[in-house]
Every structure is written in C-alpha cells, then in structure tokens.
Amino acid sequence: MIYVDAFGGDYAPDAMVKGAVLAVQEFNREITLVGHEEKIKEVFDKNNLSMDKISIIHAPEEITCHDESALAIRRKKQSSLVVAANLIKEDRNSVLVTAGSTGAVLSAGVLVTGRIKGVKRPALGAVLPARKKPILLMDCGANADCTSEYIKQFASMSSIYMKYVMGVENPKVALANIGSEEEKGNKLYKEAHQVLKETEDINFAGNMEGTEIMNSDNDVIVCDGFTGNIILKTIEGMGNLMKDILKDVFYTNTKTKLSYVLTKNVLNKEMAKLSSKRYGGAPLLGVNGGIIKAHGNSDETAFKNAIGQAIKFEENEVLEKIKNIYAK
C-alpha cells in the first residue's frame, strides 16, 4: 500500500490530494491519504475529483514547521505523519510519501519505524536533476558528522535504490571531494575513498569535485550530511539565480522580449529537464520502512511523481533488498 501524508508541505492538502488522483490515473494503484478526513474530502468536492482507488485514514492533528521535530513526533500521536509512519511500521511492504519538514520526517523514521538492524545511520537523499541523468546525492542533511563506515553504507543503500527505483544497472558511485586525486581530502574523505575502493558490491568511480556534479556520468554521489546539504542548497540557489538572470535578460527591451517569444518553447523544454518535479522526491534510507520525502513546496505533479517512486520502491522490494545486505 502507498500511504500519503496529506498534511505535510506548503500546499497541503490540495497538492497531495490532486497528486494522488493523478497517480491513480497514471499508475492504476490504490492510494491511502492520511490526514483530517473532512478537509481532504473538501478538496475532492471543490475540484470535482474522483475518489476511485483512493481511501482516507483520519488523522486530526498536524505537525507544522514551527513544531520541534522530535517532541512533536512524541506528542502528536494523531498527526498525519505519525499515523502514516505507524502504518508502514505495521506493514513493512508499504511506503509513505510525505512533504513534511525534514526534521519531522527524520524523527518519524527513526523514532517510529526504527532503523534497519545493522545500519549505523539512516541517510536522506536528494535526486539532482543533472544535465545528463538524475543523480542521487546521499546524505544531504541527516548526518552532519560521519565516519567512513557510514559513507560506505550510504553508497550501498543508494546503489540499490538507483538500480531498482530509477532503473540504473550497476550504478556508478562517486565520493564528493575537493579534488579528483585519490589522496585529496581530509582524514574522513581519505578513509572513505579507501573503504569505497575496497568494497566489492559498490561500483566506485573515485572522487568528484563540485564543478562536475551537474554534468556527471555518475549515478550516486556520497558525502557527509553537512557537505551534502551545502551542495544541495547551492544547486537550488544557482537554479533560482539563473531564472532571475534569464528573466532580466528577456525583459530588457522589445528585441529581447521578441527573442523570448521565439525561443520560449525550446527553453521551457530544456528547463523542464532540470526541474525537480520530474522525480518528485527522494528516499530516507536505513529506516525500517519505505519513506519518500517530497520537497516542501511540491505541487500535484511533483507529488504524483514522488508517488511513482514509492510504487517502484514497493514493487521491487527495495526495503528487503537493503535489509539483506546487513543480514549477511
């Protein structure tokens, strides 16, 4: 079963409800929305949406961005996020999609579903809409301090995700670093390079500098969460900057406005390739349940695509495959 936290994110519950309807139309799967039932039904009625293959589980409370994450998970037992997390705890084959705050989702993953036995630290990913293909960045904020063993586990779990959810055979894994040479980096990154190099089930491609990330041939980039979060936020910021620059250029005068009219279809097509909406979300790996974290400002298209990832996660038994690594 796919559970959707209908009250996480900036556009809740509208984006989640509409995204679920789009997902049913595209993937023909049953979906359960978790949240305040009356408010969810209002969205269906207001927009004349079909509830075919969609059910609702009532959860009257909400966890907001103003709540202290761990405390809210413990106190708001009837919140949509906690109720949904308990549902995937009861049925380990199910998957939760949520656009809730990162801190709350991490807390729910660890405190409610628990960690997979053998996993040192769960890690939060981000699917980067790179120029050639999507790249999974792991970790992007869950673990500011890491060991080389943590980073190795991030690489192993990410490789499974990319193979079975994103359809990449034998994913190539790179280590984010300040240089491509093997001896580059601080003590942690030198150790991580050696560990990754010696791990047979990881297709390690060596170090990768920041300038190469968005035009890379690799499929996974691993690093500590502190570094990963800076990478992610820098890429997001550069994307916003480029939009502002293009807007300023095209609105300079009549000639530039005309050039926009002539090029907008091609430009919009290329820009769409770099949109995070194409993938919708990214996994929280290492917890004992399937969780896809969508961006807080996800619209219905992004949410539909996040649900698509969740369906592949469930159908390909990704959680069990990750568990099997540490059961050996």
Image: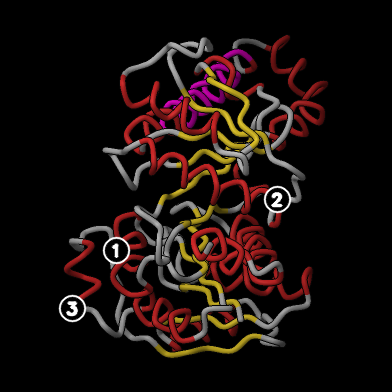
Total numbered labels: 3
Tell me which residue sits at (36%, 38%) in the image. Answer: 225
Q: Nearer the viewer, residue 4 or 134?
A: 134
On the rendered structure, is 211 left or right of 205? left
Label 2 – label 3 distance at C-alpha: 38 Å
Label 3: which residue?
A: 75
Residue 30, quarter of picture: bottom right
Instruction: Tell me which numbered mark, 2 or 3, is placed earlier along the sequence.
Output: 3
Residue 150 x, y percent position in the rendering: 38, 44
Q: Which label is found at residue 163?
A: 2
Tell me which residue sits at (69%, 40%) in the image. Answer: 171
Label 3 – label 1 distance at C-alpha: 12 Å
Instruction: Tell me which numbered mark, 3 or 1, is placed earlier along the sequence.
Output: 3
Residue 143, quarter of picture: top left
Tell me which amino acid carries mark 3. Answer: Arg
Residue 236 included in the magenta stretch of the image: yes
Magenta stretch: dominant SS?
A: helix
Label 1: which residue?
A: 107
Tell me which amino acid carries mark 2. Answer: Lys
Say few, some or many: other residues with alpha carbon within 10 Å of mark 2 (under 14 / 14 to 19 / 20 or more). Answer: some
Residue 234 x, y percent position in the rendering: 43, 26
Name above or below for residue 195 compared with residue 63. above
For label 2, the SS is helix
On the rendered structure, is 163 left or right of 39? right
Name above or below for residue 146 compared with residue 54. above
Residues drawn in magenta: 233-249
Q: Nearer the viewer, residue 32 or 116?
A: 116
Label 1 – label 2 distance at C-alpha: 27 Å
Q: How is the image coloured?
A: secondary structure
Is the C-beta separation of discs 1 and 2 under 8 Å? no
Residue 232 x, y percent position in the rendering: 45, 33
